[in-house]
Image (cartoon, rainbow, N blue to C red):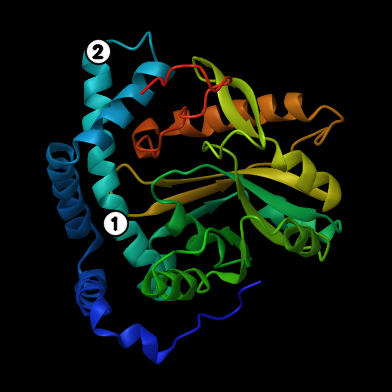
Amino acid sequence: MVEKAQFSNHLFHPKFWLLWLGVGLMRLTQLLPLSAQMKIGAGLGRLAKKLLGSRVNTAKRNLELCFPDMPQAEQEALLSKNFEETGKAIFDTINAWWWSDGKIQRHMTIKGQEHVEQTLKDGNGVILFAVHCLPLEMGARIFGQFQPGVGVYRPHNNPVMEYLQVKGRLRSNKALVPKRDIRQMVRCLRSPDVIWYTADQDFGRSSATFIPFFAMPDAATITGATTLARLGKAKVLPFSVERNADDKGYTIEIMAPLDNFPTKDEVEDAKRGNGIIEQIINKNRAQYMWLHRRFKTRPNESDPSVY
């Protein structure tokens, strides 16, 4: 468990100077009004759509696979909007890591706080069942304003970025746990405490079951929510965050704990989980991370790639 960002003089090595310069410039942008940030972010997203051909192809293919009945013109409009929202997400992360609590509170709306409080009061841990929506960093920071929890994360390979992401995320979390440390997650849930959990990406074949996700009949999906809920004696609460339509703030919503979860059938639990993920994504499709190769792992190794 990581409870403090570890700084060392090695981070001042000349090979990191350019990165530190970029970080300094990024941090200065948190002084801009949110409306100005979002305009700049949208422009950066449009530029990225012109330059990042492979990512554009991935996002476009995901939309084709998930929404085959959507008219092509609508898919193209959603793709363009998604890249604008991706550009804005740069500032969501900057703000989540460097805004003061007071400024966060002036730009946030929280719905469903009572579900978390009651679940903990009943002696159960809380698994926040989230998705990789673009403003997720801000969602965690907002949630931490009333109930700091334990973040599950992937340590960054770059030591400067690892330091920055740990320092930024600990502004809203008590601690961070590497995503493969199941034992520590269970220990936290039994405290009881709150942890974040996402199951909407492709984590490979070894821990996957192949079940429907939108129109794709066989998306590689992990079943860890069942294991965590059972071992951690925890309740699963769906969680969503959106950047408001007027770009002037953020809204998080925590839904009531899932009834009859987990069951003895982890595949059926995972299917139910994918249905919840779809509902959350459908609230704001443009703010979902479509750039991830969600369907890269096929049921059989001999199956051709869908990308």
Residue under circle 1? 90
Looking at the image, residue 185 sits to the left or right of residue 40; the answer is right
Query: Residue 53: where, in percent of width, then height?
Result: 19, 35
Q: Place residue 270 in its image quadrant.
A: top right
- Is the residue 148 above or below the residue 136 in the image? below
Q: Quadrant of the N terminus?
A: bottom right
Query: Residue 151: where, in percent of width, then height?
Result: 59, 62
Between 241 and 152, the one lying in front of the other is: 152
Say if residue 257 shows up in the picture.
no
Say if residue 215 shows up in the picture.
yes
The residue drawn where x is 37% and y is 75% is 160
The residue drawn where x is 40% and y is 17% is 65
Query: Residue 13: where, in percent of width, then height?
Result: 29, 85
Looking at the image, residue 175 sits to the left or right of residue 97; the answer is right
Between 206 and 213, the one lying in front of the other is: 206
Disc 2 residue type (three-letter) = Gln
Q: Place residue 203 in its image quadrant.
A: top right
Disc 1 residue type (three-letter) = Ile
